[in-house]
Image (cartoon, rainbow, N blue to C red):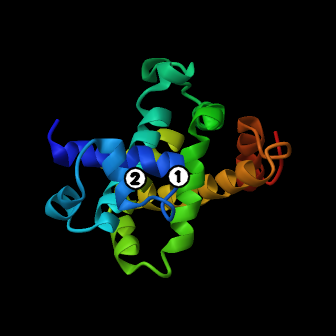
């Protein structure tokens, strides 16, 4: 790897270990084995590097829960349940089941969300990938193909993203009473059917 890639990997490690606000340029240099001038040369600023590193961390976390089911003990895509509620529950089992090993990512996401009102560049960096993220959530959680039905995928992705953020906050603040995958599935049924099956 060159300095550019080393810096990005170092920044990702720093974000997960120290968070966004506490990561300094010197931390990134120490973690990457590079030098301070490399940050400006390759990324323009520490903040631009951290923004990109954050996007990659969250993308990798998303891959962990959607594209790598075997890693978390889930079934393969070919074995996924035909029942959409079953698919929804299985995805949430993976997301919640990964909480212990991905807690640092969840903490980082909440920290970054709290910064967007005072950091226009960060807000802009986060806005770009939102559509792809929502499409991925619609596909993974509800089995909706964004290419076949883009509007349905868009609104379903908005719903899933709102749900994911809410579940994340509940697990971060009170894991004892936070919802299980079955709770979320029953809640979705209750909303759709007016009762829990």
Asked if one can make out residue 146 in the rendered structure from this viewpoint, the answer is no
Q: Quadrant of the N terminus?
A: top left
Q: Nearer the viewer, residue 136 or 108?
A: 108
State whether residue 101 is above or below residue 17.
Answer: above
Pointer 2 local density, CA inside 10 Å: few below 14, some 14–19, many at least 20 = some
Between 61 and 131, the one lying in front of the other is 61
Mark 1 is surrounded, within 10 Å at the Cα level, by few (under 14), some (14 to 19) or many (20 or more) other residues, namely some
- Tag 2's secondary structure? helix
Tell me how many marks there are.
2
Image quadrant in which you'd find residue 54 = bottom left
Q: Which residue is mark 2?
A: 27
Q: Position of residue 122 (x, y in %)?
A: 39, 71
In this rendering, does residue 121 appear at all? Answer: yes
Q: What residue do we see at 65% from left, 34% from top?
A: 100
Estimate the x, y position of residue 48 in percent, counting from the top left: 29, 65
Question: Residue at position x 59%, y 37% from top?
Answer: 95
Q: Which tag is nearer the camera, tag 2 or tag 1?
A: 2
- Label 2 to label 1: alpha-carbon separation: 9 Å
Does 93 appear above or below 70? below
Q: Residue at x 52, y 52 (%)?
A: 18
Asked whether the beta carbons under mark 2 and mark 1 sit within 8 Å of each other, the answer is yes
User: In front here: 102 or 137?
Assistant: 102
Residue 85 x %, y %: 64, 37
Mark toward the start of the polypeptide (2 vs 1): 1
Q: Which residue is mark 1?
A: 18
Quadrant of res 94: top right
């Amino acid at each position: 790897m060159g300095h550019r890639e080393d810096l990005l990997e170092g920044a990702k490690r720093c974000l997960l270990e120290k968070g966004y606000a506490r990561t300094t340029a010197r931390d990134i240099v120490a973690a990457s084995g590079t030098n301070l001038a490399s940050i400006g040369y390759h990324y323009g600023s520490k903040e631009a590097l951290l923004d990109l590193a954050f996007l990659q961390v969250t993308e990798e976390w998303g891959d962990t829960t959607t594209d790598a089911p075997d890693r978390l003990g889930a079934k393969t895509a070919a074995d996924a349940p035909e029942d959409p509620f079953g698919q929804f529950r299985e995805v949430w089992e993976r997301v919640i089941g990964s909480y212990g090993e991905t807690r640092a990512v969840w903490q980082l996401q909440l920290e970054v969300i709290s910064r967007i009102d005072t950091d226009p560049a960060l807000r802009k960096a986060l806005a770009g990938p939102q559509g792809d993220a929502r499409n991925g959530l619609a596909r993974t959680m509800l089995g909706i193909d964004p290419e076949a039905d883009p509007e349905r995928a868009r609104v379903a992705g908005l719903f899933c993203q709102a749900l994911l953020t809410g579940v994340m906050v509940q697990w971060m603040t009170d894991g004892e009473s936070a919802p299980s995958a079955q709770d979320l599935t029953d809640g979705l049924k209750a909303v759709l059917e007016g009762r829990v099956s």
